[in-house]
Amino acid sequence: MIKSKRGLMKINQYKKFLSSALVIILLLYYPFMDYYLLEKDNYDRYLKDTCEEILSHSDNNTEKVKNIIKWEQHRIIDNPNVEYFTISNILSLFFINPYRLPDNPGWYLYIGKASCQELAFVFENMAKRTNLTYRRIYADKLIKPNGESNNHRWSEVKLGGKWTIADAGWNGLYHPDYNKSYFINNGYKFGHVVIVDENFKPIKDCTSSYVNKTGHLKIEATKNGKPVENANISIYMMHENSYYQVVGHSIDYSTNSNGIFELDLATYGNTNYIIKLSSTELNGIYQYEGKKSLSLNNNENKILNVKLDEIRPGGSCFYLILGLILIINFYLYIFKGNIMK
């Protein structure tokens, strides 16, 4: 009888836990539900009206770009009710992933939160609505003159047959007042710049468009003398006593079927690179790793062979251990606890 009462108490505690978890989930996801059920149509109409107004005040594509960015500056960047996405903002942890919705620019206006990534989403959606040809640009690291760094996402539009910068998230850069030389002329540095598709997969290297001096690197991944396909690639730039990951932070890069990966990298004075490769086994339980450093000069073509000969625990190993700990604790709490009592 006593055991059954204790079992009933445990069931009631479990129900309370589930109820509390459900309430928390509903609170966190309420903005998402409210937007799609009640507000999305209103924001869609607003964006459609805004595009029509932009088109009515634009005589050519250059003016379209200028007017879209000016609208973003006024509606989002200069709006005191819109916050910048930051890790310190607890809500952003839930909104950034999985709630980055590139096909729904009204969502960012609704939640009042945006970073360079979201501003680029909004610009590209408006560019599509106004018949502009654009492409998506990304860099894992943009190094500021004071040494601070962050990743950066922006757009390019095709004007007069040439790709030109359109960046609402960085002081509202647009043609013809600014072009790709803006970053170089103002002391900003990239390690690597790439064109990405709508799924954030790399399409084409465009580092040479944003950096005056570059070198070309061909990476060969091998294990036991054989090429390693799909080896993950991370590249770190050592510059002026600072350490920056310029490849492999937000975008996954990997070797091809021949174990090869090629890219352009910036070559600044006193700059070296560290190349790290890894290849997972058993669904990530463990992995083989390899690392090499190199210096790269302007216009230099270099081949680097990286041997993956170090064995380390993989990312899935942590979750496996955590799962085992939870299962053991659950067993001790439910079964052994009842037996002891």
Image (cartoon, grey):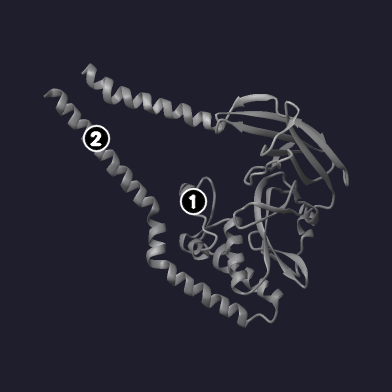
Circle 1 sits on which residue?
98
Q: Nearer the viewer, residue 90 or 180?
A: 180
Up the image or down, 131 lies above or below 236; here it is below
Mark drawn on residue 13: 2
Residue 303, image x, y percentages: 83, 38
Q: Quick check: can you spot residue 110?
A: yes
Q: Quick check: can you spot residue 241?
A: no
Q: Nearer the viewer, residue 328 or 60?
A: 328
Q: Quadrant of residue 120?
A: bottom right
Mark drawn on residue 69: none
Residue occupying the point 68% across, 45% down: 148
Q: Check the image and name the residue furthest to the top.
A: 340
Quadrant containing the C terminus in the rendered view:
top left
Q: Is residue 250 left or right of residue 210?
A: left
Up the image or down, 20 lies above or below 330; here it is below
* Mark 2 and mark 1: Cα distance apart in space: 31 Å
Residue occupying the point 75% across, 65% down: 163
Q: Secondary structure at mark 1?
A: loop
